[in-house]
Amino acid sequence: MIERRAFETLGGANHGWLDARHHFSFAGYHDPGRMGWGALRVWNDDTIAPRSGFPPHPHADMEIITYVREGAISHRDSLGNEGRTVAGDVQVMSAGTGITHAEYNLEAETTRIFQIWIIPDRPGGAPDWGARPFPTGERAGRFVALASGMPGDADALPLRAHARVLGATLRAGEQAEYPLAAGRYAYLVPAKGIVEVNGVRLQARDGAAIRDEPEVRVTALEDTELVLVDVPA
C-alpha cells in the first residue's frame, strides 16, 4: 500500500519568518487521518528566513531529526551543546527526560529543512544531541542510513528507537531499492526532483506513506534527493 500525499494537500502556516508545511497533524493543523505513521509522529517541511529561527523551547521523550536541505541551521541547548549543520548534513536530538533548545538560521540566505520526530522505544533517559556530515556523494545511487537505532548502522547518528532515517541521491534514470520488513511502516519524501515509488509518481516534497510492501523501489525521473524513514508500527 502506497498513499501519495501531495505537497499542496499538506497542512501548515506561513508566519513570515517561517513557512511551515506539515505532513502530519502539528501545531494549529489537525487531521485525525494524519496523526502519525507508525512511530513516525512529525514530518515538517520548514522554510526559515535569514536571521530568524525558533527561540528556546522544551521537548521530552522524542527523537528529533533535522535534515538540512538548503542553507544551515544553528543549534544551542540547555546541555551546553552548540553546532551549525549545513545542507546535506543531519542532527539528532534525543529529548529524553527533557531538554530546551533553540534553532536559528543565522545565515544571509534562506534555510530549508525537514524536521522529523520519531517516538522512542522507551520514555526517559538522559537527553543528548549530535550532528555529522553526510556528503551527498556517499549516497549516490543508494540509500544510506543517516540516523538509526537498528543493528549494523554504526556510521549513522544514534536513535533511541528501532527505526532508521535514510538518504539517497539519484540521477535521472537511476533506481534504488530498500527492503521493508513485514509489519514496518515507511515514509518517503523527495526533497527535489520527480520519482516513481513502486510505480506511484511523486513530485518534489510530496509524501508517500508505505506499508505492506516487501520492497521500496524508487526510480528517478529527474535528478533527485530522497529522505526515507523506516519505523515500527
Image (cartoon, rainbow, N blue to C red):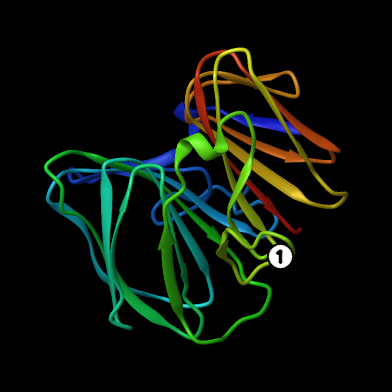
**Residue 85, image x and y in percent?**
32, 54
Q: Left or right: 152 with respect to 43?
A: right
Q: Position of residue 73 (x, y in %)?
A: 28, 53
- Asked whether, in this view, residue 230 is left or right of residue 30, the answer is right
Residue drawn 60% across and 20% down? 195
**Nearer the observer, 148 or 208:** 148
Q: Which quarter shows the C terminus?
A: bottom right
Q: Amino acid at mark 1?
A: His
Residue beneath label 1, please? 162
Please report the residue visible at 42 percent of the width from the left and 72 percent of the height from the top. Answer: 129
Q: Residue at x 43, y 58 (%)?
A: 132
Q: Is residue 168 visible?
A: no
127 vs 121, left or right, is left
Secondary element at tag 1: loop
The residue lying at 70 percent from left, 45 percent from top is 186
The number of numbered discs placed on residues in the rendered structure image is: 1
Image coordinates for residue 213, horizontal then vertical, percent:
83, 37
Q: Nearer the viewer, residue 205 or 75?
A: 75
Q: Position of residue 12 (x, y in %)?
A: 38, 43
In the picture, which quadrant includes the N terminus? top right
| Residue 131 visible in the current orientation | yes
| Label 1 crowd bin: few (<14), some (14–19), many (20+), radius 10 Å | some
Residue 121's place in the image compared with 157, above or below, is below
Compared across the picture, whether 200 is left or right of 34 comes to: right
